[in-house]
Amino acid sequence: MKRTLCVLFALMMAISHGVANDSANVAMPVVQTPEEVYAEANKDYADGNYREAVCKYERILKDYGQSAEIYYNLGNAYYRAGEIAASILNYERALRLEPSYSDAKANLAIANARTIDRIDEQKSLLGGWLSNVTALFHSTTWTYISVITFVLFLGLVFLFVFGKTPSMRKLGFYTGVCCLLLSVISLFLAYKRHAVETDHSEAILMPTEVNVKSSPDEHGTDIFLIHSGCKVRIGESIGDWCEVSLSDGTKGWVKASVLERI
Amino acid sequence: MKKTGKTINPAHIIFSIVLALLAVEVVPLQADDVVFKADAPQTVVVGTPFRLTYIVNQQSSNLRAPEFTGFSNLSGPSVSTNQSVSWVNGKQTSTFEQRYTYVLEAQKEGTFSIGPATVEVGGGKYSSNGLKIKVLPADKSAKADNGGHANGNQGGANVSGVPVSEQVFVRTIMSKRHVYEQECVLLSYKLYTLYDISNYSIGKLPDFQGFVKEELDVSNNGQLSLESYNGRNYRTATLYQVILYPQKSGSISIDKATFDFDVRIPTRVPAGFGGYFETYQMVPRSVTASATTVEVDDLPTGRPAIYSGAVGTYQLASTISSTQSKANEAITLKLTISGTGNIKTIKTPELSLPATFEQYEPKIENATKTTTSGIRGQKTIEYLFVPRSEGHYTIPSIQLAYFDTESKSYKTLTSPEYELDIQKGDGATSTIASGANPVVGKADVQVNQDINYINTRPLRLTNKQDSIYGTRMHWLLYLVPLLVSVLLFFLLRRNIRLHSDVIATKTRKANKTAQKRLKRARMLLKEGKQSDFYDEIMRALWAYVSDKLAIPTSALSKDNVAQELLGHGAHVEQIEEMNEILSECEFARYAPSTQEQTMGDIYQRTAILIGRFEDQIR
């Protein structure tokens, strides 16, 4: 009985303590809008306090939401602070949100030039063209384009069916077919873009160098060595190991902890 | 006595000088241009006579020679005049020369000066240049043996009894034995000879390892000068000279060099009767100049931070193309380093510009001359830069640190600072190749790779999932318009169908309606209402055609009805019949009275006509 009481008492103490802590936490922080934090971070960057800027950008991302610009600025701050792998990661994240972000592209190229691994990228001509077109708009925009052209198509069907003169019906037919085609294409692009936006299978290698194993265990044979900043695609994962493939197609296994998903 | 071959001796030198003077004085002279000069060898030997000549280019008189202290006058002055007149291309030129010649002999060694002499030309008094003559001691063994053949060979010493190695040799002469790193040292190989030399060539030179060398041009024109060395008067000539810049500290050795000469050694050939001919023999001789070492010291400590290896004595000057300019217009800053030393190897001093300036690779030009005291000249460095935005800027001073070999200390030269006032430029036009200095081509522009600056536009935060793609809303956006339009489609379809049904019914019921009207017409006939009867007949016909053809009555007229009926398959006779009935009715309506029989007839015909139409029209 006495013991139970003791436990109860301890519990109460703990709760009250916790409550006290919480109330202190609530009272402590000065309420800052994300814009203020952002402005402060930009000022830190301009003054050369890159580490501080990194912390502030990270806080905005954690507490308020994301934007390609913040990832880009964070990438810049990491680059200036000498952490190339982290800067590449954030440039890639910015580009995932906004694939046509030219500043991010340029800086990513510069950061990539400072990494050790040079891997031939296999990219088909059509693939590059397609991804460029996909990058034009956000998936929402593509969706709206698709919907609008679909509605237009419906209207033109009416024109085709109930048109008074043959020329009106002709017009209705051809423009209707065009609109339907456009609608389907932009739906496809919306799908592609959405896939890019939600794709988290690419990752950046964070440690200075990592031995890639042939099998998902510590005693597997080392196949090759990759260095920090290297971009890989994550395949299947077993336990805390995951299969990665480089852009030239080579595959192997690394611990999931060395990777940071884009 | 017979002399063969070319000899080098002072008499010849004098002669050649005189010839040169003559050549110069061919130019026609005006009366006032009096040239009066003294001429004598620079070095003479005690006890050997030499000539001192005063030359005037005009008729002169009253030569007053100075005191010849240290010399004794053996003969003179002997006066000779020489006049020549020549016609060249129809132009007459005349030269005149009057020479006063003294034969002197030095009495003791040392350096003596002979003051200017004066002469009178046409009432005016002119004085000559003064001379400095170095008198060398006589050879030790000269007096005893110098009887017969030394005349005209003033320095020519008797060589018998002199060891071979002392007859012709080459000395290695260093200007300094102890130098600092990068400080220049002059190395000369000098020939000393008692014989005439007719030919020489450099056999082998040291490789001067550990030095940067700059060769000097030695042009002595085969002229030899006299010099007393180890008690003998030698004829000397510099064979090879080089400026050396030691590149490392320590004791650096220079190997020996070899030179090859053709030496003319006089020999006596017996000529009978106890006499002899004196002749010369060519003897090739290889002479070695001794090896030597140079002690090179490290530059002293305490060098300035910006020091980058310049040694010597330098001055610094700078000019700027403009201090008031527009953005995007190129400005050049010209820095001139002049002086003596290792000027070619001076590194280009850094010019630190404001960050918004675009700086190009500086253009460097060396204009140097190698002299016995080192490389002298100037290095011009042109810094080209383009301010990219307007504002007020300061170009910092450029500093050059060097080790001064004279004061043995480091010195720093500083160019002035420049204040630049840059106005707003015209658009984005970049005028890199500005003015007279289009030195920078496109290839020279080097952009340093650096990341772009952060984004500072206002923040647009988005939530993690905000894409409309794939959401229920997305598919509804398709579905709702689709359903709406399908609904609309069917509604429209039905409406149209209904509309067409009305017409069909009308057509179907046309006969019935007509029969009804005919029935009423019959009633009217029986009642004897004449005009109403005809009215009803007309109405029945018109209504029938209108319903049958689905054309509103208002759109029908006598003119178009025939056409429409034909189009629907009615025969011509019936159409004519209809027209007949209609016109008869119209006529009868307003006629006062008609027979009952006529009315019955019309009734019959109308009924038959409608029946016929019923069969024909579809």
Image: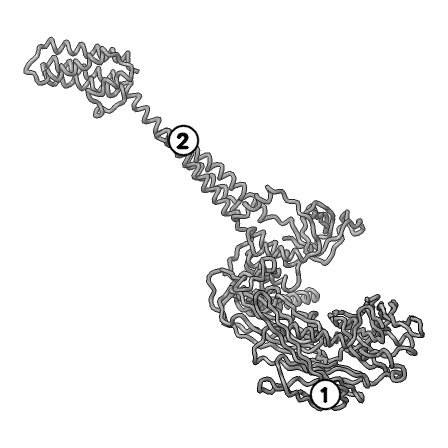
Q: Is residue B546 left or right of residue A176?
A: left
- The answer to which of B491 and B42 lies nearer the viewer is B42
Q: Looking at the picture, how far across and down is residue A26, in whole percent? A: 56, 67
Q: Is residue B527 left or right of residue A206?
A: left
- The answer to which of B9 and B79 lies nearer the viewer is B79
Q: Residue at x 56, y 62 (%)?
A: B438
Badge number at residue B113: 1
- Which chain hosts label 1? B
Query: Which of the 4 image quadrants contains residue B103?
Result: bottom right
The quarter of the picture where the C terminus of chain B appears is top left
Q: Looking at the picture, how far across and down is residue A246, in whole percent? A: 69, 48
The quarter of the picture where the N terminus of chain B appears is bottom right
Q: Residue at x 47, y 64 (%)?
A: B425
Vertical order, A237 against B53 (above or below) = above
Vertical order, A261 against B573 (above or below) = below
Q: Are marks 2 and 1 on the same chain?
A: no
Query: Which of the 4 image quadrants contains residue B20?
Result: bottom right
Please, what is the three-letter code of the amino acid marked with disc 1?
Ser
Cβ atoms at labels 2 and 1 below 8 Å apart? no
Looking at the image, can residue B544 be seen?
A: no
Q: Looking at the picture, how far across and down is residue B408, in whole percent? A: 73, 82
Badge number at residue B255: none
Please, what is the three-letter code of the amino acid marked with disc 2?
Lys
- Which chain hosts label 2? A
The residue to which callout 2 is attached is A170
Which element type, helix, strand or loop, lies under badge 1? Answer: strand
- The answer to which of B268 and B434 lies nearer the viewer is B268
Q: Nearer the viewer, mark 2 or mark 1?
A: 1
